[in-house]
Image: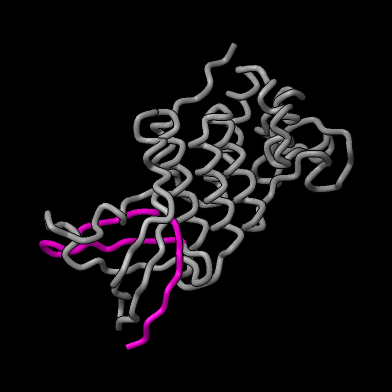
């Protein structure tokens, strides 16, 4: 039996048998793992409450034939406590967890940058310093960048010309007039500036943005993310967008 220890964020869980649960965790060193937590659905479970989504946990596991078995679990930080009472933040956090799960496809493939990005995103979301959808869009853009899918935002994605005319998902970001494909969106300059600010972590600019530009930004970022994932993010249907104004 091979024992190992790691800490990570619980992404999702689902039932197994009458009392067990399969827990998916994005860990610091190992990457994404799926472990069986035996008996956690029983009332007297020692650590069932520590293995809920949003929780940063320190785990001890032993390697199994198909799924590893969680033998110890200690809470590092329960990020969910700051989110469950606030619907916009909870739904934004749920979309973060789903995105992290989708962007880390292989199990036990180290994904330290995605892990750190998720921890930082949940911490910022829980602090309440910035509007929830702004935090979510910043997380989307940065997680895409870490995965190698960062959109071009300051020069044409195809020819690198600085004269921007539109945003084309299939082209990989902003495009000039000559490279603009049919059906490309034409966002406001302030919307593109907001996307740049969110990608770079310029919160002074992001927090000062107007609602209509936030709404337009959210639509473009969500479409770009889901195009690269080739599937929709189910949690996004519950996320409240900033009303246009």
Range drawn in magenta: 1-26
The part of the image, by quadrant, that contains residue 113 is: bottom right
Can you say which quadrant of the picture contains the C terminus? top right
Image location (x, y in percent) of residue 231: 46, 49
As drawn, 137 above or below 48: above
- Tell me: 157 left or right of 138: right
As drawn, 180 above or below 206: below
Image location (x, y in percent) of residue 141: 63, 44
Q: Nearer the viewer, residue 61 or 26?
A: 61
As drawn, 199 above or below 165: below
Q: Residue at x 64, y 47 (%)?
A: 142
- Tell me: 169 left or right of 14: right
Residue 11 is inside the magenta segment: yes
Residue 131 is inside the magenta segment: no
Image location (x, y in percent) of residue 11: 39, 54
Q: Residue at x 66, y 57 (%)?
A: 148
Q: Residue at x 52, y 45 (%)?
A: 226
In the image, farthest residue toward the top: 245
Q: Nearer the viewer, residue 67 or 165?
A: 67
Identify the main secondary structure in magenta: strand
Can you say which quadrant of the picture contains the N terminus? bottom left
Q: Residue at x 53, y 70 (%)?
A: 29
Describe the colour scheme in one phrase. Answer: one colour
């Amino acid at each position: 039996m091979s024992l190992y220890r790691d800490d990570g964020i619980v992404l999702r869980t689902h039932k197994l048998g009458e009392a067990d649960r399969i827990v998916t965790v994005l860990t610091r060193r190992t990457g994404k793992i799926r472990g069986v937590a035996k008996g956690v659905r029983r009332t007297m479970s020692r650590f069932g409450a520590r293995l809920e989504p949003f929780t940063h946990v320190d785990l001890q596991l032993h390697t199994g034939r198909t799924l590893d078995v969680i033998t110890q679990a200690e809470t590092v930080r329960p990020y969910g406590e700051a989110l469950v009472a606030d619907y916009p933040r909870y739904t934004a956090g749920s979309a973060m967890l789903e995105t992290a799960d989708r962007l880390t496809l292989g199990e036990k493939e180290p994904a330290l940058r995605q892990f750190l990005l998720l921890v930082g995103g949940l911490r910022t979301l829980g602090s309440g310093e910035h509007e929830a959808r702004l935090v979510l869009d910043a997380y989307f853009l940065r997680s895409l960048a870490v995965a190698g899918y960062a959109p071009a935002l300051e020069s044409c994605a195809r020819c690198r010309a600085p004269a921007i005319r539109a945003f084309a998902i299939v082209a990989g970001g902003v495009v000039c007039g000559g490279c603009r494909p049919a059906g490309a969106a034409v966002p406001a300059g302030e919307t593109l500036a907001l996307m740049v600010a969110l990608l770079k972590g310029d919160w002074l600019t992001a927090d000062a943005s107007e609602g209509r530009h936030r709404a337009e930004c959210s639509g473009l970022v969500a479409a770009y993310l889901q195009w690269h994932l080739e599937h929709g993010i189910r949690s996004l249907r519950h996320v409240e967008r900033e009303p246009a104004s």
